[in-house]
Amino acid sequence: MPSASLNGESKDSMAQAFRSTRVLTPEGLVPATLLVEGERITGVHGWADVPAVTHLRDFGDFVLLPGLVDSHVHINEPGRTEWEGFETATRAAAAGGVTTLVDMPLNCVPETTDVGALEAKRAAAQGKAWVDWAAWGGVVRGNAEALLDLAGAGIPGFKCFLIHSGIDGFAWVNDADLRQALERLKGTGLPLLVHAEVAGPVNTATEALNDAGADWRAYSTYLASRPDAAEVEAIELLIRLAGDFETPIHIVHLSSARALPLLAEARGRGLPITVETCTQYLWFAAEEIPDGATEYKCAPPVRGAANREALWGALAEGLIDMVTTDHSPCPPAMKRRDEGRWDLAWGGIASLGLALPVLWTAMHRRGVSIDRLGTWMSAAPARLAGLSGRKGALAAGADADIVVFDPDAPLTVTPEDLNFRHKLSPYVGAELQGRVLETWLRGEPVFSLDYFHGAPRGRELVRA
Ligand SMILES: [Zn+2]
């Protein structure tokens, strides 16, 4: 194991040099030495060029990655800490090489739709965060007056739904509400993140399934209840809005590959639209999901294998910008696994900390270069959250958030590998490749294989 004796060394003020034959810099995977002074990277040097009077940490041939940024996570604290919480979510992140989490404004209570709720979240996070974090604000029906105050309080952007969110306290918005919100956000430069499914096609499909007496234990029933059309219609609306306003719009968790031509056309016109997909849409396929296995339930749903490959194609082309987890756990009882009813189970997949080996395994099988990991899981989500320069790259000036990754180590996921609160995940049993050996946050170690260092010292990243 590299640098086994970290105890006590990290507190001294001596500069550190992180060296490997494979360092993922913005220029690609190269032999390099990262000079770290205090919390920051101050230089990227040649492999042999170790500055004098530094503590050399030589990681051999292991890959050094920039700390991952997961811009789509539901931490659920305050208010539903029994679902997850800062302590457990950020532990899972640290063990998975994720050094920055951006929390979604719902499932916590109160929902983050005004400054008071943001302050409650800040208070709840005190002393519990193992990695750095930020909080998206919410756009809901009726909170237009609160948006500029939230922006002024330092959030990186906003999230809204075009369909029922699963949480009654987080009201979805229609075209008119969106126009009101975008009018206010114009000029702030902050992005509006949108859950891009509209209700019409979902309601129509669900009624038809119920009329036909569909079996709600069958995954095919759930998939049919959330048709591609719900995503396509939502994205058509968002493209119109992106054309009418100057506010950047971000499509969260794209599942339907049928929306890709629309997005390509909109981007071709220079509209400010970015797109994410999630690990579950790139790993699983509808054909492989067992009936009743509600740990796979998420919305939009995991679609078929051909759809999955089309998402990979869009990632390769750069049309899809980034990969997040949409980690959205709940107490196991809410998954109602004994009944296996897809219509009654909570929708949300728990996966925080697994995204790196999952994505890397899938990339390796497809012959995709490891270089892309840095773009998809670190640089692009950092940019979305307004953190470029500080997070998302191993480059001079950035925080020294460094992941030591063994891309060849086998990993079979067991419940013991999961550091989030409830050990229920569709990835249990998955045979993966790649292990996080160490995670460093701002120049100090947070995690070494199966061990957490010291106490939580993550900070909120408040936009200046
Ligand atoms: Zn989500």
Image (tube, rainbow, N blue to C red):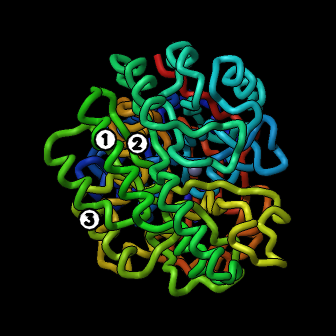
Residue 193, image x, y percentages: 45, 39
Residue drawn 32% across the image and 60% down it = 259
Q: Based on the displayed image, in which of its 4 quarters is residue 336 positioned?
A: bottom right
Q: Is residue 402 visible?
A: yes
Dot label at residue 392: 2
Circle nearer the viewer, 1 or 2: 2
Circle nearer the viewer, 2 or 3: 3
152 with respect to 60 (left or right): right
Residue farthest to the front?
A: 211
Residue drawn 84% across the image and 78% down it = 338
Q: Indicate whether 71 appears above or below 219.
A: above
Q: Label 3: which residue?
A: 316
Dot 3 lies on which element?
A: helix
433 with respect to 343 (left or right): left
Which numbered disc flags the more N-terminal residue, 2 or 3?
Answer: 3
Q: Residue 464 or 143: which is nearer the viewer?
A: 143
Q: Is residue 357 visible?
A: no
Residue drawn 53% across the image and 20% down it = 144
Gap in angstroms between the C-alphas marked 1 and 2: 15 Å
Dot 1 lies on which element?
A: strand
Q: Label 1: which residue?
A: 44
407 with respect to 85 (left or right): left
Which numbered disc flags the more N-terminal residue, 1 or 2?
Answer: 1
Q: Based on the displayed image, in which of its 4 quarters is residue 86 positioned?
A: top right
Q: Residue 164 or 300: which is nearer the viewer?
A: 164
Residue 206, image x, y percentages: 59, 68
Residue 111, image x, y percentages: 69, 33
- Going by the numbered disc 3, the residue's amino acid type is Ala
Q: Residues within 10 Å of mark 2 (few under 14, many from 20)?
A: many
Dot 2 lies on which element?
A: loop
Residue drawn 20% across the image and 47% down it = 267
